[in-house]
Image (tube, rainbow, N blue to C red):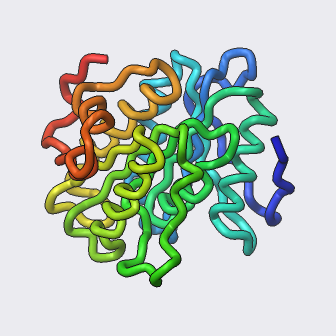
Amino acid sequence: MAQHAPPARGVRLGRAAGANGSGSTVSGVVLLLPGASRFSPGPLRPLGRALARAGGTEGLVAHTVILGGEASREEQAGWAADEAVRRYGDVPVCLAGYGAGGLAALRAGGHDAVNSVVSLAPRLEPGAPAGSPEPVEHLSGRQVLIVHGTNDARSDPEASFQLAARAKKANRSTCRFEVHSDGHGLREHQPEVVALAVDFVLGAVCSGRYSRPVADALAAPPPLGLRMPLASGFGRSLRR
């Protein structure tokens, strides 16, 4: 696998959360890619804490990617995946991002080590120029979850649906959940969003098992599996 040189001074992995960081015990890595503003972290911080609690005993470790320099978020995400492989060996990597980080996770999802992508409110622009849609073919073979609030005023939910529809054609293991009445920050239903992402990551990286709603969304043909409503209270009584 080709290694990426550090794209810019300053990019690094934050402190490990979850498994103790030893290469002999880590069985999977989640790289958390932040949004455009540190003042609007969205659900990434609670997601990192929840992943550490739920997946630490299964060998899952999570790192926030500390961005730096002028390289694109996609390039920095690729470097972070390389760094995860260097530290922990040949273990599956999940890219989980919010906003601009959600888009970077999708764009960098073709990295050899990446087996799954979680994209929360990806920062997509409505009406991409004709002939230049976001590429999706590189996501083949990955497990992909997209989550978007229906009232997102910063990133067009319909654009993420269109991207998911194209991704589903290249990769059947793609699903998308809609959070009705929620905005870009996914604040109104943050516990449900976090529970959904944790369920997906544990299934994709650790156990291969998903809750019934996620399994149904992955199996359903479009558009059903791409407009799945996120139920209020999701995660309160999941059985894995």
Residue 239, placed above or below residue 78:
above
Relative to 211, 146 lies left or right: right
Find residue 64 and report its horizontal and vertical position in percent. Answer: 59, 48
Q: Quadrant of the C terminus?
A: top left
The one nearer the camera, 177 or 223, is: 223
Q: Quadrant of residue 76?
A: bottom right
Relative to 44, 29 lies left or right: right
Q: Quadrant of residue 88?
A: top right
The one nearer the camera, 208 or 224, is: 224
Relative to 171, 182 lies left or right: left
Residue 124, placed above or below residue 206:
below
How many marks the image carries: the answer is 0
User: Residue at left 35%, top 72%?
Assistant: 155
**Residue 196 visible here:** yes
User: Residue at left 82%, top 64%?
Assistant: 9
Task: Residue lying at the far bottom in this picture: please name it.
Answer: 129
Residue 204, placed above or below residue 103:
above
User: Residue at left 64%, top 36%?
Assistant: 16
User: Residue at left 34%, top 75%?
Assistant: 154
Residue 192, placed above or below residue 38:
above
Q: Quadrant of the N terminus?
A: top right
Find residue 101 and report its horizontal and vertical position in percent. Answer: 52, 60
Q: Quadrant of residue 33?
A: bottom right
**Residue 37 visible here:** no
Find residue 207 and report its horizontal and vertical position in percent. Answer: 46, 18
Relative to 180, 218 lies left or right: right
Find residue 116 and report its horizontal and vertical position in percent. Answer: 52, 39
